[in-house]
Image (spheres, rainbow, N blue to C red):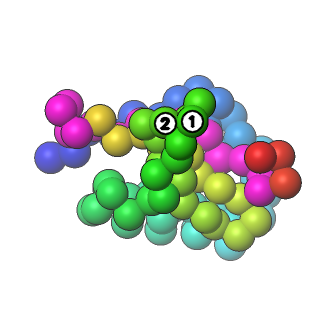
Amino acid sequence: MVIVAFDASFEKTLKKIKDSTVINKVKNQIKKIIENPEIGKTMRYNRKGTREVYISPFRLSYAYIIEENKIIFLDIYHKDEQ
């Protein structure tokens, strides 16, 4: 069983989103990530070790720690803030 954790910045940003369709998309992507943690695009350079999934117009950033079988949802941010 995969252990799931949410970073404080992730929860804070998610609470700011008012659009219910976007929130539903985020929830669906979280379910998909829990089922298959390696679906996200792997990041490089200073963000090495994290993965991202695109949810229009946001990006959901998470880390998958294979040794601990743990997923940490780090942040959700607008694509333009990259």
Q: Residue at x 48, y 58 (%)?
A: 41
In the depicted structure, whether residue 15 falls above or below residue 26: above
x, y percent for residue 15 = 70, 43
In the visual, does 79 lie left or right of 28? Answer: right
Residue 11 seen in render: no
Residue under pointer 1: 45
Q: Residue at x 71, y 40 (%)?
A: 13
Farthest residue in the top direction? Answer: 8
- Amino acid at dot 2: Lys
**66 or 15, which is in the foreground?**
66
x, y percent for residue 62 = 48, 43
Quarter of the rendering containing residue 19:
bottom right
Q: Which mark is residue 48?
A: 2
Dot 1 falls on a residue whose secondary structure is helix
Farthest residue in the right direction? Answer: 80
**37 or 23, which is in the foreground?**
37
Q: Residue at x 53, y 53 (%)?
A: 52
Question: Which stretch appears magenta?
Answer: 66-79
In the visual, does 1 lie left or right of 76? Answer: left
In the depicted structure, whether residue 54 falls above or below residue 81: below
Q: Let me know if residue 73 is in the magenta part.
A: yes
